[in-house]
Image (cartoon, rainbow, N blue to C red):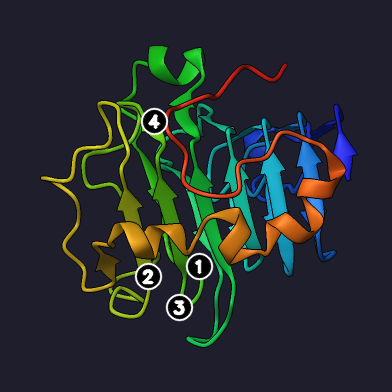
Amino acid sequence: MAKDIGFENSAGAIKHQAVALRVSGDMAIFYNCQIDGYQDTLYAHSYRQFYRDCNITGTIDFIFGDASAVFQNCRMIVRKPLDNQACMVTAQGRKDKRGQGATVLQNCYITAEPAFIAATLPFKSYLGRPWKDFSRTIIMQSFIDSTIDPEGWAPWAGTYALDTLWYAEYDNTGPGAGQAARVKWSGIKKISPQEAEGFTPAKFIEGDIWIKPTGIPYDSGMMQSLKVSSVM
């Protein structure tokens, strides 16, 4: 478990891909951590992972990989990119339809740094795009501010994976959470409360077995209200 630690790749946006943290171990826990970068900040590579009360910053695909990863009470902060770039919070990389990997944001706060908001160029940002064929991302019970484009999701290249990805939004709030203008790809799902519950830590990554005993703050199931607080 990592607790009260900062991870940073200081290369800057000009250096393109620059991972600040790669996580490949099973039952990995990050609590009250700061993870800073630009493109590809956090590589949630594989196995079960749990992030609680963390700040994660970046520009392009700044949470990517094919772990079974749950982010709970975290802040995803979009940074100002280079000119002619668009920002992507996630780029999930599930290659096999039977794979267990997914990126789950629960009770998170998706926003932007002041430099992004104040920029004179009209930068766009999206919840994510499909890195691999069966990309799977669930955003639920979270606050999405107006930083996120009304379309919500962006393609990787042309029509790649638009029919095979699995993206869902459930019970989110905020000016960027509206569904009316969202993309209409067949891979965009409308899920039931029961399906959403399947992506909670207890059910999706068996968190009651290995997270609960650590004593860190942890909600095993669906949450009642947004409880995100500033980390650093």
Please say if the residues under marks 3 and 2 sit with CB atoms less than 8 Å apart. yes
* Mark closer to the chain start, 3 or 4: 3
Badges 4 and 1: C-beta atoms under 8 Å apart?
no
Q: How crowded is mark 1: few (under 14 residues within 10 Å), some or many (20 or more)?
A: many
Answer whether labels 1 and 2 touch (C-beta < 8 Å).
Answer: no
Q: CA separation, marks 3 and 2?
A: 7 Å
Q: Is residue 48 above or below residue 182?
A: below
Q: Nearer the viewer, mark 1 or mark 2?
A: 2
Label whose residue precedes the other's in the sequence (4 or 2)? 4
Vertical placement of 147 versus 86: above or below? above
Q: How many residues crowd mark 4 within 10 Å: few (<14), some (14–19), many (20+)?
A: many
Task: Of the two numbered discs 4 and 1 on the same chain, state the one appearing first in sequence.
Answer: 1
Q: Which amino acid does label 1 sit on?
A: Trp
The alpha-carbon separation of the residues under discs 1 and 3 comes to 9 Å
| Alpha-carbon span between mark 1 and mark 2 | 12 Å
- Mark 2 closeness class: few <14, some 14–19, many ≥20 residues within 10 Å: many
Res 143 label: 4
Q: Do the residues labelled 3 and 4 touch (CB within 8 Å)?
A: no
Residue that badge 3 annotates? 134
> What is the quadrant of the C terminus in the image?
top right
Q: Badge 1 is on which residue?
A: 131
Q: Report the side of 83 relative to 7 (left or right).
A: left
SS label for mark 3: loop
